[in-house]
Every structure is written in C-alpha cells, then in structure tokens.
Image (cartoon, coloured by chain):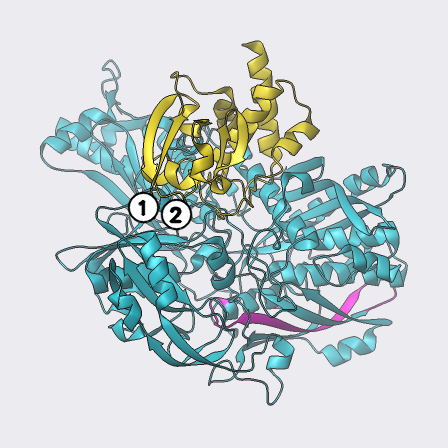
Amino acid sequence: MSENTLIGKPEIRVDAWPKVTGQAEYVADFSLEDVHFGYIVRSPHPHASIRRIDPFKTLQMEGVLDVITIEDVPGEKMVGDIIPDRPVLAWEKVRLVGEPIAIVVAISKHIAEQGGKAVEVEYQPLVPVFDPVQALEEGAPRVHASGNLVSHIEVQDGDTQAGFQQADMILEETFHVPRIYPGYLEPEAAQAQWNPDGSLTVWVSSQKPFHDRHLICQALALPEEKVIVRVATVGGAFGGKEDSSLAILAALAAWKTKTTVRLVNTREESLLAHPKRHSGQVHYKAGFKKDGTLVAMQITSYLDTGAYASYGPAVGQLHSEVLGGPYKVPNVRVDTYVVYTNSPIAGAMRGFGAPQANFGTESLMDIAAGKLGIHPIELRRKNIWRPGDRSYTRVRINQAESLQLSLDVAEKEYWRLKNIPPAPGKVSGVGLSLSVQTMGLGYRVPDDSAHALEWLPDGRVRLYLGAPELGQGLMTVAAQITADALGLSLNQIEIALLDTSQVPDGGVSCASRMTYSVGNAAMTASRQLIQALIKEAARLLDIEPALLHYEKGHIIRQDRPDLAPIPASEITSRLAENGQILKRQAVFSFPYGPETPDHLPIGMPHVLFCFGAHVIRVEVDVELGTVEPKEIVAIHDVGKIINRATLEGQVEGAISMGLGYALLEEMKLKPDGTWVDNLTEYLLPTIMDMPPVIKVIFLEVPEESGPHGAKGIGEMGLTPVASAVANAIYDATGVRVKAIPIRPEMIIKEK
Amino acid sequence: MQLIQVSLKVNGKKYQLETPPNRTLLEVLREDLRLTAAKDGCSSGECGACTVLMDGKAVNSCLVLIGSADGHSIETVEGLHKTGAPHPLQKAFVEKGAVQCGFCTPGVLMAAKALLDQNPDPDEEQIRMALAGNLCRCTGYTKIIEAVQEAAKELHHE
C-alpha cells in the first residue's frame, strides 16, 4: 500500500499552463500540411423531399476540388450511435434544419463557402412535426418510414392499482422541459488527412475517438487499422461531442479528394445540427398516505429526440430509471416514449435524462408536501432509500446512507438560508431538492476502460490515457492517482497524445464514469508495472525477485540494505539499450454483480448511484417576475476527494448549466418557423447570472469498488438545480411553475 | 477584391500586412500571424472567446474589421508572459483552478487584464461587469472571479 501522498491534494491541473499561455491546440488552431477547406451544404427545411442535388455550377468554379454527396460514400450510407438511422449525407429527404447534404472542398474557406452557396438543391417541402405527443398521433407526418416511435421503455414493479387504492391522496401533475444546447465554447471541428498508403489520420474534438474510428470505417468501408483518430485539446463537450458526424464528414471528404480537409462549424451550424438535451413532457400520478408514505407512482414521459435517434433510446432508459427519484416506491409503472420529430437532434447531454426527471419528481414532492401539510424535508426523509432498499429496477441501492447524510446537511443549510431577509422590494424563498445520478453505461453495455503505463528510460512514467480530457480534469486526476500508486511526484507522469493507434480503448468520456474507471485501471496498471520493474531488476541483478522491494521510484535490495536504492531509470534505460520497453496495460470493467436483474433492456439497470442535495435561496421581484438566485448550497457525496479544485470546478460549472436550464435556455422554434441559432437569442448564463454565493459541500462515503473510494461527479451537480429553483420560487411567491425555463411572465401571470 | 495595407503592432512587434478588407482582426491574428490563442467561438461578438486588447481596451476581435485595426496596438495572450515570467493573472488562473476546457480562457484573461490595467483594485461587481461579455460553460465563473481577485492582490504587492 502506498502512502496517500497525492490523493486529495489540490494539485494544479496538468493542462493548465498550456491553456493560459495560448499553447494548447484545439482542432481549429492548426492546419495540417496542404489543407483544403470544406463547407457543408445544409438543409434550410425541417422536413422536405430532395428532388435534385446539382453541383454543376460549383464544380466549374476555380479553386473547387470536389462536391461530395451520398453517392460518394463507399460503405454504410446510414450510421448511428445506437440505431443506424442517420444518412452520412442526406438524399431523398431531409428531416431537420441544418442536415448535411453535400460537402464542397476548395482551396480556401471563402471559395468553399461560395461554392457551397452555388450547389443547387431542389426541395419539395413536407409538413413537419415538432411535438413528440403530436408525432405519435395517427396521421402525423412521418419523420421516418418506420414510424415516429423510436422506443417505448416500460418499467413495472409491484401493483400500481392496488397501490393507488391504499393512497389517501392522489396527485396528478404534468411538467414540461425544454430542448437545450450543450453550449461548449469550442464549436465542433475536424481535420482529416489522406495518406498515400490509403490510410486516414483524423483530428477530432471528441468524447469518443474509438467510436469515431468505428463509424468512419463503417461509412468508408475501411478496416480499422487504416484509420487513426487523434484527439486535440477539446474545448468542452458535455455529451454533445459524443456525436461523430463532423469527423465522418471530414474523413469522407479527405478520402474522396485524396487530400487533407478541414471542417470547422460555425456557432449557427453547431446550434442547429448537433445534438441537444431532449425536451419533453412528463405526466405523474402519485399516491401518498396521510403520513406522507409514497405508495404508488404511474409516470408517462414523452421525450423528443428530434430527427435522428442519436443516444435517445439510452437517454429514455436512464430517464425511466430515475423518474421515481431517490425514493422507495413499492408500486410503479413507467412508460417513456422516445419520439422522432423534425426538431434538432437530441442525444447525450450531461445528466442523460436525469435532469428532466428530476425537475418533475422533485417539484412533485414539494407539491405533495404542501397538500399533505408535511414539510418538504420531512416528506423526503420519510420516503428516501435506506440501506438495504432496492429501486423499482430491482437494484440494491449502493450507499443509501449518503442520501440521509445529504438531507441532514441540507436541512441545516435550509434553515440558515430561511433566516436571511430579502432585499427591499423583493420576496425570498428557499428550495431544496435531492439528486440521484447513475454512474456508468448500464448493464450489458460493454463498459470497459483500458489504459496503459510505460516506464520511460529517464525514470518518468507515460500514461496512455484511452479516453479524452474534455476540460473536466480527467488527465489531472488520472495522473494524480497514477503518481500516487507509483509513489512518484505528479511531474514524473507524462500523458501521451490520444491516438487510437497508440493508446488502448478507454471508452467514451461520459456517464460520470471516468475518475472511477480510469482510476481503477491506473491503479491496477501501476501494480503490474511495479511487479514488472521488480522482475526486470531481479533479472539484471541476477537475484531472486523476492529479495527486491519497490519504493518511490526505486528498487531496494532487502538482502543488502547498505546499498543505495536503485532508481527505476537505471533499470528502464538498461532495457532500452536492448530495445525493450517496460509497459503494462490494465482494463477496468464496470462491475455488475450476480444480483443484477436482466429482465430489462440493454443499458438497464444502472447499479451505482451518486447522491446529493441542493438548497437554493432566491429573491423574486413579484411585479417584474424576475428571479435572482442569491445562494446555492450543493451537497454531494463523492466517495473520496481526489482533487478538490477540479471537483469544485465540476460542481460550480454544473450549477451554472443548471441555472441556465432553470431560467434561461431554450432551443426554441420561433414564430417565423426558424430555430434560435445564435447566442444572442439562445442565452447561456454569464458571470452576471451567477449568484453571489455558491457553497459546495462534499461528503465522503467511500464506494468500495472505487479508486480510493471515489465515484463520479460530472453530471449530478446539474441535475437538482432546476427543481430547487422552482421550489424556492414557490416558497417565495406561492406560484408553482411546472415548466422550464422559468420566465418572468409565468410568475406574474400566476400571481 | 482590392487588397489594403495594414500596419499593426501586436504584442510589441510591428507587422505590415496586405489583406482583403473584408477580414476581421481575429482572422488576421489566427490565419496570417498564426497567433491562435484568441478563439473563434461565434464570429459575432456573442461569446468573448476572441477578446484581445486594442490600445489597452478589451475588444471582440471578431467584430473588428482589419482596416479599423490599422495603426493600432494589439495585445493577445501570447504577449502576456513575454518578459519570461507569467503574468499574475495566468498564475492565478492556474493556481485557483479557473481553467477547465480552456477555450474561453484567453479571452477571459485579456478582458481581466484590461480591467486590472485600468483599475488595480476592483471589487467583485466590477470584475463581473468587466467579464460580462465572456461566456464560460465549464467553470460557473466562481474560480475565475477568485483568480482575478488573487491576481489583483499579487499586482498590489509587486
């Protein structure tokens, strides 16, 4: 066991200096040799037949190399993350505004754009559908020939009819949640280089380079050894960069023109054409006994996945798992419908279906508390999962005790905030919500994460991290855990470029799984690397390995304590002289125990949960309807703090994203039939929107399967924000909002 | 299109350029001078990732047509540590954890520098006002505010 020298230390981020000096290179910051510029011709219609695509005029233009359409795709013409429902380039019809139809490749950005505007596309507009409930009605416009229902997820536990019969109060409520934009500051970008041996090198800004490679190979009918994907510095992702479309299009353009092609999206393209968070509506029927005991829930949810499924079916599943909140519900029926419409595509986004569920469920708990005359905190305390409880997906809840702890801490904060008087002319209120977020990809989805370590001749250790840093601090946390496990200092760890031909497959950077998975793999690989070092040292010294002991980068001879410890570099440099390298790879597979129920679809159930609570104090101007969050207390059980600064950064960032969800953001269809496509109309929270006080409290209830007890934090800081804001507004004004974003007129109108 | 002659002083160094007039300062910095710290996040002055200093004032370089930068002095993040030592803002951003994905960071740093050059002792509200045009989706701004406060403190000691 190594000493815990680095775990929990506020080490500075390993990628911070390059980022503050401008040296960090994002895909758009460099140009590969002899680069050409691509322009994507996109659909102006939400739904239309394509009658004709005519690139003739463009092809006559000087400086234009080629115009690429679906006919140029040699492999699969339809690809997808779960369902292969999305054309690489549209033909026959378009299903959303911004859908790619052709790529113009030219010698300059300007010529490519001019060429793109000269491509003639003749459309026959079709009636679009934008509402998931309408899309399921008979006679609704068909987005796909297969029908508009992508998936129907059913969860049944107990007997809801019998449950409602036991209830003293039955509550029925409907909540609406908006489509929102991940809003990473770096728009999508890719550069692809065709190599004379027929292979491709593709630079991406991505969460999933190995999936990108797989999808590129599918579309281009290439074997995987012919495609190398490299990840540049990623300028934020939040789930939105689990979309491979730009990487595929860049690869296709490079392959077809046998050149190097650069594609960089504008903000407008990013807003229109890349995945969002699902909008939807959730209907609840919930039965309570007089004493507050929750006896039955029947929930029907409609999620709008837009024109293509993306990760919609999986989002619908996770959503269905957490719709009941962190509560013991003996009788449950959940029906979630994931539906195609002609809206912008919805896919993965931080929280992955949980924020939508949380807004409904945690609002509902406060409404129920009001009707029952029980304090919202007490109603929650009555119903939360306790150790030994299982969820309605029949999973035994890990660390249910941290829910109780979160609630206890939240209660103290709640009463502290209640005592703060409002500013003159304002009313104030305090809202509380619990947060449940799952970790990992779900049962029977391959959820492995491989990483490798190499002891270099100079004594440093190179970490081959198999999944991308997105800005969340993965590289730092992985380096910290590795350095700690090897007894080295952080600056003795270097991180290899993420190149799919050089690093093992670490899976997708997503699902609050990275610290947990990477940390575990890094610890295993470290142990193996130390054993390998001892073995090589024994061989070189020609003694028994048992006589050697490893400590802090050195080998110590136990039979000769008088000799100076041998630095690892002495062994690895000797190996290097013989052309040998010392490298070990470890895979961590997400654990699913023998108890895991297998009657649910692939990806269900999740078996590890993260818990927390948020308490938010708002001030409301009842005449103007404006809401100002004044203080947010975020309480999260993280198992074990690896790096406090990066953890706090995750929570603070998630809170701002949650406030945007609650109060500002909506990817809206305007009355003129166009979508919001710029950041003047689509409002991301600015520094002025953040409350004066954000207090982050971490609980450390160790997760026994986690590295040093750590678990995920990436998503759960966002999940409870919107409901806590809505609950605070109710506390302040008596107005119950059942839709987000909460706009001033919703508060004034109700008053 | 007729080319125009432009002279710029960027991070203390003089440049003479010939360029079509319909380009922005951001494009010239990134494409011609290969100074890519300033980022293109929206091309329309909404996000602040392209913020640089023009004669000491923070501007969105994506909104400055290159002709109107003629004869002016520009500062970018590449010039912040030109004396060898990092600027106190850079140090504070690193130490306070104010950097996540880093895409907004160069713009935020320059907007913060414009503030501290003008007002060495800003209060929190003044910091917020100065950075109101710089979007950050990762940090929630908390650590950015702390870092600017820390840098101001350090500049006082110097």
Q: Name the kind of residue labelled 1 in the image.
A: Leu
Task: Indicate whether residue A81 is drawn in magenta.
Answer: no
Which secondary structure, mark 1? loop
Which residue is pictured at 47% across the width and 20% down the height? B87
Other residues around mark 2 within 10 Å, as few (<14) / some (14–19) / many (≥20): many
- Mark 2, residue position: A468
**Cα distance between the residues tagged 2 and 1:** 7 Å
Chain-order first, disc 2 or disc 1 = 2
Q: Chain of mark 2?
A: A
Tell me the quarter of the image containing the C terminus of chain A: bottom right
In the image, A210: left or right of B152?
left
Residue A59, position in %: x, y? 26, 67
Which secondary structure, mark 2? loop
Which residue is pictured at 33% across the width and 29% down the height? B16
Count up the numbered dots.
2
Chain in yellow in the render: B
> In the image, which residues are magenta?
A288-311
Chain in cyan in the render: A
